[in-house]
């Protein structure tokens, strides 16, 4: 009977990478039209590391906030709050029913995506280190899968090289050559991060306020605040572009930039078209009479009552929940990174060892 | 060796994969993740004896005595072993470990070029994938069957027949892919034949 030379190890097929266990080495295979191989002999492997990354958290936060806003939109549209306008009743009922279906489907899709991300678990970067190379294993990008895979090949390495006890490790790393190693202090997150997240939080809060207090000045201020927040995020990402110790803040900043783009561009267009259709005015008549972004248009917007149209209600729910969520999470992560960095700089490192 | 933040280390040591801070013995465990006290990253680290093994680089410093055999490539140096492929005497510097065998540099080059040993192969062309692409792509653009089918289908069938018995992947099974590609290419030719008959008859 023909025996298999390589045994497949657990792992996703991210970027078409797969990891296989051979008789005396691990084989990292990248399959495209050309299949390339990288070998790690059990006898040469020095250490195996796993480092969690914030990408899964950002993904789940994004999907979770959209899921939450869709659910809240469905609930609010279904409430009698937005059904107090008797005109065009049949049209409104149809529109509201359709919107409930659209937001319901959106909530199901986002909920399913969120569930899938939660099942797959925390994202991570796995590396195999030998004397001459430190290679990332792209197929082991989930903590759960990576630990399962480690459990399969680490015993083989230990049977080849021998197992280290904690005392052995302590004895070895007590040697001066390992103690004198320099390490990098973690990067201190800049104040620009805090400012950008505070601005996003303010955007979310003011969006919620704008729903209830209809005033041209507030709408105008909010539009300008969106622009300022976007610039602040770009500045914070640009200023800390080389610092990879704080990826969570960079990714959250990018999520915030995406939120602002969607909220401002789509929100503005939805607002314009819906408000014009509600007031029975032609789109181009208002457009021609006032400039597109003038205070008169904003004043015109502010004449619409809160909850007068379900699309606007949904927009405000979306903008308020996501803005507040990203802002609070960003400020919390900023505080955490800063606390750790300052703790390390003061010499509190290693206390929990 | 370069860490993610751009720091260069000459040899590996047990440290945080993110910031490089040396780890304590209790922090070295593959089973569960712990938070780095320096940068806050959650990480699991497992070290092996190879990390602490002192590996001396081979040298060819031993001078030859009158009664001893010399290295084929370094005549002034003492031979340590004989090449298992060509039988030439080689010193410790020229003794290259290839899949458990002692080879001289010339024979190792030859083995790599001729790919005699599976453990020396770094890349392989996946002809089964190429055949599959050739067999499938015309189906995606239906109108293409009319024009390109004679070329793509025959090329796919030729690749399948020529490489069916060759091992074009170290780890994946290729024969089912070849068989499927061959069948799809055959159907492609049949469709093309019907189209030609419908057009010209």
Image (cartoon, rainbow, N blue to C red):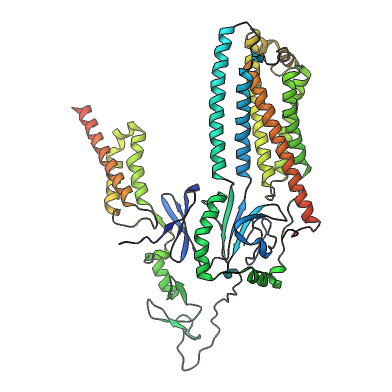
| Res A172 → quadrant | bottom right
Quadrant position of the N terminus of chain B in the picture: bottom right
Which of the two residues, B14 or A245, is positioned nearer the viewer here?
Answer: B14
User: Is residue A157 placed above or below A86 in the rendered structure?
Assistant: below
Identify the residue at horizontal 67%, vertical 50% (top origin): A244
Residue A2 placed where, x, y %? Answer: 32, 61
Residue A41, can we see it?
A: no
Residue B106, can we see it?
A: yes
User: Is residue A120 placed above or below A301 in the rendered structure?
Assistant: below
Residue B162 placed where, x, y %? Answer: 28, 53
Residue B155 located left or right of residue B122: left
**Residue placed furthest toward the top:** A87
Quadrant position of the C terminus of chain B in the picture: top left
Which of the two residues, A220 or B145, is positioned nearer the viewer here?
Answer: A220
Identify the residue at horizontal 65%, vertical 41% (top origin): A251
Identify the residue at horizontal 60%, vertical 34% (top origin): A63
Identify the residue at horizontal 71%, vertical 68% (top origin): A179
User: Is residue A153 placed above or below A74 in the rendered structure?
Assistant: below
Residue A233 placed where, x, y %? Answer: 71, 37
| Res B37 → quadrant | bottom right
Residue A5 placed where, x, y %? Answer: 39, 62
Q: How many marks?
A: 0
């Amino acid at each position: 009977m023909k025996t298999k030379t390589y045994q497949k190890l657990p792992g996703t097929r991210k970027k078409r990478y797969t990891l296989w266990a051979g008789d005396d080495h691990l084989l990292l295979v990248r399959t495209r039209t050309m299949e390339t191989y990288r070998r790690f002999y059990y006898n040469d492997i020095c250490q195996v590391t796993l480092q969690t990354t914030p990408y899964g958290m950002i993904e789940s936060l994004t999907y979770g906030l959209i899921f939450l806003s869709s659910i809240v939109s469905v609930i609010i549209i279904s409430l009698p709050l937005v059904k107090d306008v008797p005109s065009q009743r049949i049209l409104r009922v149809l529109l509201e029913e359709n919107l409930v279906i659209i937001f319901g489907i959106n909530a199901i899709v986002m909920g399913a995506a969120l569930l899938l991300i939660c099942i797959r678990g925390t994202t991570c970067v796995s590396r195999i280190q030998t004397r001459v190379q430190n290679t990332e294993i792209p197929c082991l990008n989930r903590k759960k899968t990576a630990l399962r895979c480690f459990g399969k090949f680490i015993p083989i390495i230990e049977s080849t090289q021998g197992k280290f006890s904690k005392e052995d490790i302590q004895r070895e790393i007590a040697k001066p050559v390992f103690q004198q190693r320099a390490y990098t202090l973690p990067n201190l997150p800049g104040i620009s991060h805090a400012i950008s997240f505070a601005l996003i939080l303010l955007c979310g809060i003011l969006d919620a306020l704008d729903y209830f207090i209809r005033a041209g000045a507030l709408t105008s201020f909010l539009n300008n605040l969106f622009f300022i927040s976007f610039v602040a995020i770009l500045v914070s990402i640009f200023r800390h572009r080389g610092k990879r110790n704080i990826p969570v803040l960079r990714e959250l900043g990018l999520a915030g930039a995406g939120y602002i783009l969607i909220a401002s561009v789509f929100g503005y267009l939805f607002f314009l078209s819906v408000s014009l259709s509600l007031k029975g005015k032609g789109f181009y008549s208002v457009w021609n009479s006032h400039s597109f972004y003038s205070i008169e248009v904003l004043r015109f917007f502010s004449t619409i009552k809160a909850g007068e149209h379900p699309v606007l209600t949904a927009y405000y729910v979306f903008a308020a929940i996501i803005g507040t969520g990203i802002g609070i999470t960003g400020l919390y992560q900023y505080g955490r990174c800063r606390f750790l960095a300052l703790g390390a700089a003061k010499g509190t490192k290693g206390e929990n060892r | 060796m370069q860490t993610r933040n751009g720091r260069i280390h000459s040899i590996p040591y047990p440290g945080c994969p993110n910031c490089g801070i040396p780890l304590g013995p209790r922090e070295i465990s593959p089973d569960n993740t712990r938070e780095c006290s320096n940068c806050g990253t959650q990480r699991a680290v497992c070290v092996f004896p190879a990390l602490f093994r002192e590996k001396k680089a081979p040298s060819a410093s031993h001078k030859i005595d009158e009664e001893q055999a010399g290295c084929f490539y370094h005549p002034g140096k003492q031979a340590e072993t004989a090449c298992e492929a060509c039988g030439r005497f080689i010193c410790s510097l020229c003794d290259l470990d290839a899949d458990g065998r002692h080879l001289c540099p010339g024979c190792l080059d030859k083995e790599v070029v001729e790919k005699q040993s599976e453990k020396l192969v770094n890349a392989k062309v996946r002809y089964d994938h190429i055949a599959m692409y050739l067999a499938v792509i015309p189906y995606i653009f239906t109108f293409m069957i009319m024009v390109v089918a004679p070329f793509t289908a025959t090329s796919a069938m030729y690749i399948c027949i020529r490489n069916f018995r060759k091992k074009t992947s170290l780890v994946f099974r290729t024969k089912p892919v070849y068989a499927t590609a061959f069948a799809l290419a055959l159907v492609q030719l049949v469709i093309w034949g019907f189209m030609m008959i419908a057009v010209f008859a």
